[in-house]
Image: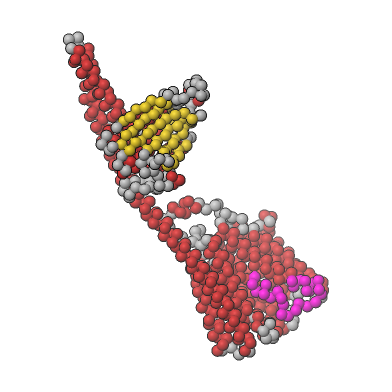
Amino acid sequence: MSALRGKTGLAIIWLCLVGGYAAVSLVLRPGAQLTAFADVAQCVVLLFANAGLLLNAASPDWRRNSFWMLLGMGCGMWFVGQLLWTYFEVLQHQPVPQPFLGDVIFFLHTVPLLGALALRPHAPRADRNLRFGHVDFQLLLSWWVYLYLFIVIPWQYVAPDVERYGVSYNRLYSFENFTLVAMFAYLVLRTAGPWRRVYAHLAGAACTYALGSMIINSAIDRGSYNSGSLYDLPLVASFVWFGVTGIIARDACPPAAAPDTHAEEESSEMPEENVWPARMAMAAALSLPALALWSELESSAPLEVRRFRLLTTLVAMVVLSSLIFLRQRMVDEDRLRLLRASKNALVNLRRIQSQFVQAEKLASVGQLAAGAAHEINNPLTAILGYSDVLLQLPDVPERGRDVAQKIREQARRTKDVVGKLLTFAQPQTSVLTLLDINAVVASVAELRRLDLRHKNIELELEMEKHLPGVHGDANQLLQVFFNIIGNAVDAMEGAGGGLLKVRTLRDRRNVVIEFSDTGPGIREPASAFDPFYTTKPVGKGTGLGLSICYGLVKEHKGQITCANRLGGGAVFRIELPAIMALLPLRDSASTPIPISKRLS
């Protein structure tokens, strides 16, 4: 098909299919050969139209795929009707009966074309989904079937009248075809760029088909039509035009990349709403009683025809009303979904605002801590220096030396605490080094010790003595442990106190850190690491702490899980890959040697 692209290739297509058909129609005399050629040629042209249209039905956008597939379905239905026509004329060697069984297929083949227009494939973002498309198509199909049953069928079966059947069918079919032309023209006026060109070609093909169909139906009613005559030329040209339009659209509107649904969800722009399906549903519902009143008050049709039309209208009202109610329920569900999403977005926005405020506070605390550390370190250095001098003086009594030694130890301890606080508060560049997890856990426990003194909460450490090292960033792991301990403290503080146990151990090729508390537990453990999930009131928790912890642990190629304990409380388990080269040689059956330390 790629060889047929370009102006030269399209010109060759027109010359071979349309020009060749016209030439054979002029050369052959009316008869069996011309009839067979015309029927087979029209089947070939319809297959070409289908192939050209379906070339575009392979994009990641379902609306674009559905648009071209519906256009191909319309041509496919005409192909089925043409096969029935060919069966009578070529295989049975008899004229097509009037009324023709395939007339309803020819009539309904325009419905998929009309349904395709409601999909608006040119719109970059639309609010409609696949469920709406199905219901809208069923509404459209039901309404046109009702019109066919109301206007045409009475003269075929209720009160047979071939002449009135032909007139009714031609008028309704022309109305349907020119409705399609008008809708294509409307899209031409409302669009720009490559899609305007595509819609213009489709409008031209639909207009050619509508005019050709009127000409052929009029000739059939006069008895002057035979297959293969020049009456078929506009029909053949219209289907060639449909196929050529598909080839043009393949180059002018290439399949786009898969849409970024995540980006669309986060976009602040609301999609443009398509009001045409709702308007068509309203017009269809209002037309039913209007046609029934016309049939009863103004029509000169026989009584049995009016009764049939009234019964058809009642059945159609039930069907269309059910579809309209179904569509309205789907619309309501979609609006409620959007309302819930908007509500969640508003709550998340408030949490983000709270997080920004908290981040500013932490930044201020970090700056204050940096300044305070500088001011504290100067007197600490003097204290350490004077204590060293006291220890070196020979005439200081033993009691004075003990006091000087204690002053020195407490000063160094204070200096270490200030240094750890600065390491945690100030942002640091990620640096992966060989770490001792026990040392990191001990640092966190020491930072939290003063905070737990007046909260009736005990912190117990149980650390395996010979623990392998891990490859990670000390500051990031410090943040993870601090956040988990902080959540546990908040939970137990609301319950009046409790015990938080931090345990380190080796499990096969991993270093494991477990945090278990005696608090109320986690309401939804499966959602604990979801962004913005929190059970704390707005302003106190942002719902991002555990999500950040999850990301940091994943960056360390580890795993973090949480669950509720059987006896009450929550358990967080972090597994980090161990550096196997540093594993101590030990018997696999030996038990770890715990180091227990209770801080209150």
Nearest the viewer among 390 and 375 is 390
Q: Is residue 42 left or right of residue 252?
A: right
Residue for point 26% across, 21% down: 409
Nearest the viewer among 170 and 446 is 446
Q: Quadrant of residue 417?
A: top left
Q: Quadrant of residue 152?
A: bottom right
Question: Residue 172: x, y in percent?
Answer: 62, 79
In the displayed structure, 523 sits above or below 382; it is: below
Q: Quadrant of residue 598?
A: top left
Residue 200 makes an appearance in the image:
no
Magenta includes 418? no
Q: Is residue 23 left or right of residue 388?
A: right
In the displayed structure, 222 sits above or below 486; it is: below
Residue for point 61% across, 70% down: 111
Question: Residue 538: x, y in percent?
Answer: 33, 50
Magenta includes 108? yes
Query: Considering the image in quadrants, where does the C terminus appear?
Result: top left
Question: Residue 251: x, y in percent?
Answer: 61, 56
**Where are the magenta residues, as a range?**
84-109
Nearest the viewer among 135 and 86 is 135
Nearest the viewer among 331 and 3 is 331
Residue for point 66% across, 61% down: 52
Query: Considering the image in quadrants, where does the N terminus appear?
Result: bottom right
Q: Is residue 416 left or right of residue 236?
A: left
Residue for point 48% across, 35% down: 557
Question: Residue 231: x, y in percent?
Answer: 71, 76
Residue 588 makes an appearance in the image:
yes
